Amino acid sequence: MRHRLLWLTCAWLALPLGGSVARADSAADAETWVRQIYYEGFPAELALELDDPAVEALVEMLDDPAEAAYHGNIVLALGLRAHPLSYATLSALAETPPDGEVDRATFRAHTQVRIALGQLARKDGRALRWLLDADQGHELPTWHFRNHRGARLRVLLDELTWTGLALSGTPAAAAHLDRVIERSQGPDAATQRRRRHAESARALLDRARADRAAGRQR
């Protein structure tokens, strides 16, 4: 799963943070496309075009348990769009974890929210601060999905937080990841895995910054 998320995030790096195009049927359009299954990558270009009615419709869907199957797509869309409603919506989801055994859709939404906050952090400093603060606490989650539980789920959430920080492309995120790498010294497998992922996140951050710099020069 981690490799797939990294592949998806790399595909988004070259995309501009564009504005929205208002359409009378934009809310209905948004509800339709977030309900689709995308086998070749999330359609980030559609998220960048969301206007106010479309974003408001997605926020309502995210609060509706009947739409849970599509919450993962909605989370990603809100992060990419960087709308004024995005931070409050995404941080509320991240700060309200489920409890006990969850289904696949809930697992997807509550893990990918850290990726979405990383995308949002490119334009909203509050999302960056959330990710930095989230990496200070390492309590074990009270929820689980299949064999992702306890310490194993904590490791995954930490790694997704670093990936989110990498996507922000900010100096603060770079400094934080450098500190994680510096602290991840030791021969045991868990520490080595921690270091490898932090180094991968740091490399992703450098690519994100390079791609955006190249885009500004064109």
Image (tube, rainbow, N blue to C red):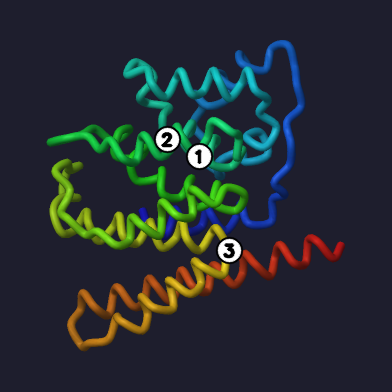
Q: Nearer the viewer, mark 3 or mark 2?
A: 3
- Give the answer, above or below, for where 212 lies relative to 196: above
Count of marks overlaid on the render:
3
Q: Nearer the viewer, mark 3 or mark 1?
A: 3
Query: Which residue bears the numbered disc 1?
Result: 76
Left or right relative to 117: residue 184? left
Secondary structure at numbered mark 2: helix
Q: Are marks 2 and 1 in contact (CB under 8 Å)?
A: yes
The residue closer to the viewer here, 205 or 70, is 205
Q: Amino acid at mark 3?
A: Gly
Question: Which class describes the residues within 10 Å of circle 1: few (<14), some (14-19), or many (20+)?
Answer: many
Q: Are marks 3 and 2 in contact (CB under 8 Å)?
A: no
Q: Amino acid at mark 1?
A: Leu
Q: Amino acid at mark 2?
A: Gly
Secondary structure at numbered mark 1: helix
Query: Which residue bears the numbered disc 2?
Result: 72
Question: Which class describes the residues within 10 Å of circle 3: few (<14), some (14-19), or many (20+)?
Answer: many
Q: Which mark is residue 169?
A: 3
Q: Locate the C terminus and report the quarter of the image it occupies.
A: bottom right
- From the top left corner, tell me how far across and down residue 161 is, in percent: 38, 57
**Which residue lies at the image location 36% right of the left edge and 53% below the top edge?**
1
- Give the answer, above or below, for where 106 lies relative to 26: below
**Which residue lies at the image location 33% right of the left edge and 55% below the top edge?**
134
**Which residue lies at the image location 60% right of the left edge and 34% below the top edge?**
83
Secondary structure at numbered mark 3: loop
- Give the answer, above or below, for where 99 lies relative to 217: above
- From the top left corner, tell me how far across and down residue 163 is, in percent: 44, 60
- From the top left corner, tell me how far across and down residue 119 is, in percent: 55, 50
The residue closer to the viewer here, 125 or 209, is 125
